[in-house]
Amino acid sequence: MYQIITLLALVISSNLFAQSSMPALPETESANVQDDKVIAFNELKAKALTGDLDSLFNLANKYNFGVKGICPRDKKLAFDLYLYTATSGHKESQYYLISYFKMAAVKDEKHSADLLAEACMWATISGRTISGISEATRAEGIKRAGEFVANKNNNISESVKKLNIPETETLPQEVVYKKRTPLKRFATYDDYDNYRIAVCKDYLAAYNVIKNKLANATPAEIKTYKDNAEKLIELQKCSKAYLSYNQPQTSTTEKDLKSSETFRKEQFQKIYSQISLIEINTDIQTPITLDQIKAGADFVDKLKDLIALKPKFYVRSVTY
Protein backbone atom coordinates (compact mmCIF):
# COMPACT_ATOMS: atom_id res chain seq x y z
CA MET A 1 0.00 0.00 0.00
CA TYR A 2 2.80 2.45 0.93
CA GLN A 3 4.55 1.80 -2.42
CA ILE A 4 1.33 2.53 -4.30
CA ILE A 5 0.90 5.80 -2.44
CA THR A 6 4.52 6.80 -3.10
CA LEU A 7 4.27 6.05 -6.83
CA LEU A 8 0.98 7.91 -7.06
CA ALA A 9 2.48 10.91 -5.27
CA LEU A 10 5.34 11.02 -7.81
CA VAL A 11 2.88 10.94 -10.69
CA ILE A 12 0.74 13.65 -9.10
CA SER A 13 3.67 15.95 -8.33
CA SER A 14 4.53 16.09 -12.03
CA ASN A 15 0.95 16.58 -13.17
CA LEU A 16 -0.46 19.28 -10.88
CA PHE A 17 -2.39 22.08 -12.56
CA ALA A 18 -3.47 25.30 -10.86
CA GLN A 19 -7.07 26.39 -10.66
CA SER A 20 -8.21 28.41 -13.68
CA SER A 21 -8.17 31.69 -11.75
CA MET A 22 -6.64 32.99 -8.57
CA PRO A 23 -9.08 34.25 -5.88
CA ALA A 24 -9.68 38.00 -6.07
CA LEU A 25 -7.93 40.01 -3.37
CA PRO A 26 -9.76 42.91 -1.66
CA GLU A 27 -8.29 46.36 -1.12
CA THR A 28 -6.08 46.91 1.90
CA GLU A 29 -8.21 48.37 4.70
CA SER A 30 -5.73 51.04 5.81
CA ALA A 31 -4.94 53.89 3.40
CA ASN A 32 -1.93 54.99 5.48
CA VAL A 33 0.79 54.11 2.97
CA GLN A 34 3.45 55.50 5.34
CA ASP A 35 2.71 52.82 7.94
CA ASP A 36 5.43 50.18 7.66
CA LYS A 37 2.95 47.37 8.38
CA VAL A 38 0.75 48.59 5.51
CA ILE A 39 3.79 48.88 3.23
CA ALA A 40 4.86 45.32 4.07
CA PHE A 41 1.34 43.96 3.54
CA ASN A 42 0.97 45.70 0.17
CA GLU A 43 4.36 44.38 -0.90
CA LEU A 44 3.27 40.86 0.03
CA LYS A 45 0.00 41.27 -1.87
CA ALA A 46 1.78 42.66 -4.95
CA LYS A 47 4.14 39.69 -5.00
CA ALA A 48 1.22 37.30 -4.49
CA LEU A 49 -0.55 38.79 -7.51
CA THR A 50 2.40 37.73 -9.67
CA GLY A 51 1.53 34.14 -8.76
CA ASP A 52 4.32 33.58 -6.22
CA LEU A 53 3.04 30.60 -4.22
CA ASP A 54 4.93 31.35 -1.00
CA SER A 55 3.51 34.88 -0.98
CA LEU A 56 0.01 33.58 -1.63
CA PHE A 57 0.39 31.11 1.23
CA ASN A 58 1.59 33.85 3.60
CA LEU A 59 -1.28 36.06 2.46
CA ALA A 60 -3.69 33.22 3.23
CA ASN A 61 -2.27 33.13 6.75
CA LYS A 62 -2.89 36.86 7.11
CA TYR A 63 -6.56 36.53 6.10
CA ASN A 64 -7.00 33.38 8.17
CA PHE A 65 -6.34 35.32 11.37
CA GLY A 66 -6.84 38.92 10.26
CA VAL A 67 -4.57 41.91 10.80
CA LYS A 68 -6.27 44.73 12.68
CA GLY A 69 -6.70 47.81 10.49
CA ILE A 70 -5.07 46.14 7.46
CA CYS A 71 -7.08 43.08 6.46
CA PRO A 72 -10.19 41.44 7.93
CA ARG A 73 -10.40 37.90 9.22
CA ASP A 74 -11.75 36.19 6.10
CA LYS A 75 -11.81 32.41 6.53
CA LYS A 76 -13.40 31.83 3.12
CA LEU A 77 -10.79 33.84 1.23
CA ALA A 78 -8.01 32.23 3.26
CA PHE A 79 -9.30 28.75 2.44
CA ASP A 80 -9.61 29.60 -1.28
CA LEU A 81 -6.01 30.81 -1.27
CA TYR A 82 -4.80 27.67 0.51
CA LEU A 83 -6.74 25.55 -1.99
CA TYR A 84 -5.40 27.51 -4.98
CA THR A 85 -1.79 27.19 -3.87
CA ALA A 86 -2.25 23.55 -2.87
CA THR A 87 -3.55 22.65 -6.33
CA SER A 88 -0.58 24.51 -7.75
CA GLY A 89 1.80 22.20 -5.90
CA HIS A 90 2.62 24.25 -2.80
CA LYS A 91 3.56 21.70 -0.13
CA GLU A 92 2.78 23.80 2.97
CA SER A 93 -0.70 24.57 1.62
CA GLN A 94 -1.24 20.86 1.00
CA TYR A 95 -0.18 20.10 4.57
CA TYR A 96 -2.60 22.77 5.79
CA LEU A 97 -5.49 21.14 3.89
CA ILE A 98 -4.66 17.76 5.43
CA SER A 99 -5.01 19.26 8.91
CA TYR A 100 -8.04 21.31 7.90
CA PHE A 101 -10.04 18.34 6.66
CA LYS A 102 -9.02 16.19 9.63
CA MET A 103 -10.28 18.88 12.01
CA ALA A 104 -13.45 19.31 9.95
CA ALA A 105 -14.06 15.56 10.28
CA VAL A 106 -13.88 15.83 14.07
CA LYS A 107 -16.46 18.64 14.08
CA ASP A 108 -18.77 16.94 11.58
CA GLU A 109 -19.08 13.27 12.52
CA LYS A 110 -21.91 12.80 10.02
CA HIS A 111 -19.54 13.41 7.09
CA SER A 112 -16.30 12.35 8.81
CA ALA A 113 -15.51 9.54 6.35
CA ASP A 114 -15.93 11.90 3.39
CA LEU A 115 -13.81 14.64 4.98
CA LEU A 116 -11.11 12.19 6.05
CA ALA A 117 -10.99 10.85 2.50
CA GLU A 118 -10.34 14.42 1.36
CA ALA A 119 -7.54 14.71 3.94
CA CYS A 120 -6.14 11.41 2.68
CA MET A 121 -6.29 12.73 -0.89
CA TRP A 122 -4.09 15.71 -0.01
CA ALA A 123 -1.80 13.48 2.03
CA THR A 124 -1.35 11.25 -1.03
CA ILE A 125 -0.77 14.23 -3.30
CA SER A 126 1.89 15.61 -0.95
CA GLY A 127 3.58 12.24 -0.49
CA ARG A 128 2.36 11.72 3.06
CA THR A 129 0.17 9.22 4.85
CA ILE A 130 -2.30 9.71 7.67
CA SER A 131 -3.02 7.19 10.39
CA GLY A 132 -6.13 6.33 12.34
CA ILE A 133 -8.50 5.97 9.37
CA SER A 134 -10.23 2.95 7.90
CA GLU A 135 -8.82 1.14 4.88
CA ALA A 136 -12.01 1.99 2.97
CA THR A 137 -11.53 5.71 3.63
CA ARG A 138 -7.85 5.48 2.72
CA ALA A 139 -8.71 3.75 -0.56
CA GLU A 140 -11.26 6.46 -1.34
CA GLY A 141 -8.62 9.14 -0.66
CA ILE A 142 -6.13 7.48 -3.02
CA LYS A 143 -8.86 7.15 -5.65
CA ARG A 144 -9.64 10.87 -5.39
CA ALA A 145 -5.96 11.71 -5.73
CA GLY A 146 -5.85 9.72 -8.98
CA GLU A 147 -8.97 11.47 -10.26
CA PHE A 148 -7.44 14.81 -9.29
CA VAL A 149 -4.62 14.17 -11.77
CA ALA A 150 -6.83 12.66 -14.46
CA ASN A 151 -9.28 15.59 -14.50
CA LYS A 152 -6.49 18.12 -15.06
CA ASN A 153 -8.85 21.02 -14.25
CA ASN A 154 -8.85 20.40 -10.49
CA ASN A 155 -12.55 21.07 -9.99
CA ILE A 156 -13.70 21.76 -6.42
CA SER A 157 -14.69 18.46 -4.83
CA GLU A 158 -18.07 17.83 -3.25
CA SER A 159 -16.33 17.61 0.12
CA VAL A 160 -15.17 21.22 -0.18
CA LYS A 161 -18.67 22.34 -1.15
CA LYS A 162 -20.05 20.81 2.07
CA LEU A 163 -17.75 22.87 4.26
CA ASN A 164 -19.42 25.68 6.15
CA ILE A 165 -16.62 28.23 6.00
CA PRO A 166 -17.57 31.61 7.54
CA GLU A 167 -17.38 34.72 5.39
CA THR A 168 -15.54 37.91 6.29
CA GLU A 169 -15.51 38.71 10.00
CA THR A 170 -14.78 42.02 11.66
CA LEU A 171 -11.88 41.63 14.06
CA PRO A 172 -12.94 42.10 17.68
CA GLN A 173 -11.70 45.08 19.61
CA GLU A 174 -8.48 44.47 21.48
CA VAL A 175 -9.26 43.13 24.93
CA VAL A 176 -7.75 45.17 27.75
CA TYR A 177 -7.19 42.94 30.74
CA LYS A 178 -7.41 44.50 34.16
CA LYS A 179 -4.09 44.15 35.94
CA ARG A 180 -4.34 41.89 38.94
CA THR A 181 -3.38 43.51 42.19
CA PRO A 182 -1.45 41.51 44.80
CA LEU A 183 -3.53 39.95 47.55
CA LYS A 184 -3.41 41.96 50.77
CA ARG A 185 -0.90 40.42 53.20
CA PHE A 186 -1.30 39.81 56.92
CA ALA A 187 1.39 38.73 59.36
CA THR A 188 -0.98 37.39 62.02
CA TYR A 189 -4.56 36.35 62.52
CA ASP A 190 -5.20 39.49 64.59
CA ASP A 191 -4.07 41.66 61.68
CA TYR A 192 -6.50 39.87 59.38
CA ASP A 193 -9.36 40.00 61.88
CA ASN A 194 -8.93 43.73 62.54
CA TYR A 195 -9.06 44.28 58.79
CA ARG A 196 -12.14 42.06 58.51
CA ILE A 197 -14.01 43.96 61.24
CA ALA A 198 -13.16 47.38 59.75
CA VAL A 199 -14.19 46.41 56.21
CA CYS A 200 -17.42 44.76 57.33
CA LYS A 201 -18.31 47.73 59.53
CA ASP A 202 -17.76 50.24 56.70
CA TYR A 203 -19.64 48.09 54.22
CA LEU A 204 -22.67 47.62 56.49
CA ALA A 205 -22.84 51.39 57.11
CA ALA A 206 -22.90 52.07 53.36
CA TYR A 207 -25.28 49.14 52.75
CA ASN A 208 -27.79 50.38 55.32
CA VAL A 209 -27.92 53.80 53.68
CA ILE A 210 -28.72 52.27 50.27
CA LYS A 211 -31.10 49.70 51.76
CA ASN A 212 -33.15 52.43 53.46
CA LYS A 213 -33.20 54.79 50.48
CA LEU A 214 -32.97 52.48 47.47
CA ALA A 215 -34.11 54.55 44.45
CA ASN A 216 -33.73 57.76 46.46
CA ALA A 217 -30.03 57.22 47.17
CA THR A 218 -27.77 60.03 45.98
CA PRO A 219 -24.91 59.48 43.51
CA ALA A 220 -22.42 60.13 46.33
CA GLU A 221 -24.06 57.49 48.52
CA ILE A 222 -24.06 55.01 45.64
CA LYS A 223 -20.35 55.67 45.03
CA THR A 224 -19.60 55.12 48.74
CA TYR A 225 -21.45 51.81 48.58
CA LYS A 226 -19.55 50.69 45.46
CA ASP A 227 -16.18 51.61 46.98
CA ASN A 228 -16.93 49.61 50.11
CA ALA A 229 -18.27 46.70 48.06
CA GLU A 230 -14.91 46.59 46.24
CA LYS A 231 -13.16 46.33 49.60
CA LEU A 232 -15.55 43.58 50.62
CA ILE A 233 -14.62 41.62 47.49
CA GLU A 234 -10.96 41.98 48.46
CA LEU A 235 -11.85 40.69 51.92
CA GLN A 236 -13.62 37.73 50.32
CA LYS A 237 -10.43 36.84 48.43
CA CYS A 238 -8.32 37.21 51.56
CA SER A 239 -10.69 35.06 53.59
CA LYS A 240 -10.67 32.29 50.98
CA ALA A 241 -6.87 32.32 50.92
CA TYR A 242 -6.10 32.60 54.62
CA LEU A 243 -8.80 30.71 56.50
CA SER A 244 -9.13 26.97 56.99
CA TYR A 245 -10.58 24.75 59.68
CA ASN A 246 -8.77 24.74 63.01
CA GLN A 247 -9.76 22.20 65.64
CA PRO A 248 -10.01 24.10 68.95
CA GLN A 249 -8.77 22.62 72.21
CA THR A 250 -11.51 21.45 74.58
CA SER A 251 -11.77 19.42 77.78
CA THR A 252 -14.59 17.19 76.58
CA THR A 253 -14.26 13.40 76.40
CA GLU A 254 -12.74 11.88 73.28
CA LYS A 255 -16.13 10.59 72.09
CA ASP A 256 -17.81 13.95 72.55
CA LEU A 257 -14.85 15.73 70.96
CA LYS A 258 -15.04 13.53 67.86
CA SER A 259 -18.76 14.12 67.52
CA SER A 260 -18.46 17.85 68.19
CA GLU A 261 -15.52 18.41 65.86
CA THR A 262 -17.04 16.41 63.03
CA PHE A 263 -20.13 18.60 63.19
CA ARG A 264 -18.06 21.78 63.57
CA LYS A 265 -15.84 20.91 60.60
CA GLU A 266 -18.84 20.11 58.42
CA GLN A 267 -20.36 23.46 59.34
CA PHE A 268 -17.11 25.23 58.52
CA GLN A 269 -16.83 23.57 55.11
CA LYS A 270 -20.45 24.38 54.34
CA ILE A 271 -20.14 28.08 55.21
CA TYR A 272 -16.72 28.33 53.55
CA SER A 273 -18.24 27.03 50.32
CA GLN A 274 -21.12 29.48 50.61
CA ILE A 275 -18.93 32.57 51.05
CA SER A 276 -16.82 31.46 48.09
CA LEU A 277 -19.87 31.44 45.84
CA ILE A 278 -21.40 34.74 46.92
CA GLU A 279 -21.09 37.37 44.17
CA ILE A 280 -20.90 40.84 45.66
CA ASN A 281 -22.34 43.41 43.28
CA THR A 282 -20.44 46.65 42.61
CA ASP A 283 -22.39 47.58 39.47
CA ILE A 284 -25.84 48.35 40.88
CA GLN A 285 -28.40 49.59 38.40
CA THR A 286 -31.16 52.14 38.86
CA PRO A 287 -33.77 51.90 40.12
CA ILE A 288 -31.91 50.12 42.92
CA THR A 289 -33.55 47.07 44.43
CA LEU A 290 -32.78 45.29 47.68
CA ASP A 291 -31.88 42.11 45.80
CA GLN A 292 -29.06 43.93 44.01
CA ILE A 293 -27.22 44.77 47.21
CA LYS A 294 -28.20 41.92 49.53
CA ALA A 295 -25.33 39.57 48.62
CA GLY A 296 -22.71 41.73 50.35
CA ALA A 297 -24.67 41.75 53.63
CA ASP A 298 -25.15 37.99 53.33
CA PHE A 299 -21.39 37.57 52.95
CA VAL A 300 -20.76 39.63 56.09
CA ASP A 301 -23.15 37.41 58.08
CA LYS A 302 -21.68 34.18 56.70
CA LEU A 303 -18.15 35.32 57.42
CA LYS A 304 -19.15 36.18 61.00
CA ASP A 305 -20.52 32.64 61.40
CA LEU A 306 -17.33 31.20 59.93
CA ILE A 307 -15.11 33.12 62.34
CA ALA A 308 -17.16 31.76 65.24
CA LEU A 309 -16.09 28.24 64.23
CA LYS A 310 -12.45 29.05 65.07
CA PRO A 311 -10.76 28.99 61.66
CA LYS A 312 -7.03 28.54 61.24
CA PHE A 313 -5.01 31.38 59.71
CA TYR A 314 -2.37 30.72 57.06
CA VAL A 315 0.32 33.10 55.86
CA ARG A 316 0.14 32.72 52.08
CA SER A 317 2.56 34.03 49.46
CA VAL A 318 0.18 33.67 46.53
CA THR A 319 -1.17 36.68 44.63
CA TYR A 320 -4.41 37.28 42.82
Image (cartoon, rainbow, N blue to C red):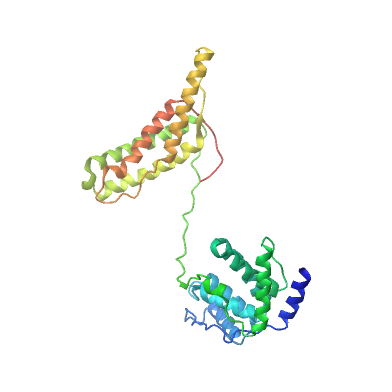
Q: Is residue 15 left or right of residue 235?
A: right
Residue at left offset 43%, top offset 28%: 307
The image shows residue 113, relative to residue 177, as above or below, that is below
Could you tell me residue 38's position as x and y percent? 53, 79
Residue at left offset 46%, top offset 24%: 264
Residue 295, by quadrant, is: top left
Q: Is residue 299 left or right of residue 105?
A: left
Q: Which residue is situated farthest in the left direction here?
A: 216
Q: Is residue 10 left or right of residue 266?
A: right
Is residue 250 something that shows in the picture?
Answer: no
Is residue 278 something that shows in the picture?
Answer: yes
Could you tell me residue 270's position as x and y percent? 45, 32
- Quarter holding the N terminus is bottom right
Could you tell me residue 117's position as x and y percent? 63, 69
Q: Which residue is situated farthest in the right direction here?
A: 3
Could you tell me residue 141's position as x and y percent? 66, 71
Residue at left offset 34%, top offset 47%: 226
Residue at left offset 61%, top offset 77%: 57
Q: Which residue is situated farthest in the front direction here?
A: 136
Count the marks: 0
- Tell which of 4 and 298 is nearer to you: 4
- Tell which of 21 and 281 is nearer to you: 21
Q: Is residue 261 left or right of residue 17?
A: left
- Tell which of 238 and 289 is nearer to you: 289
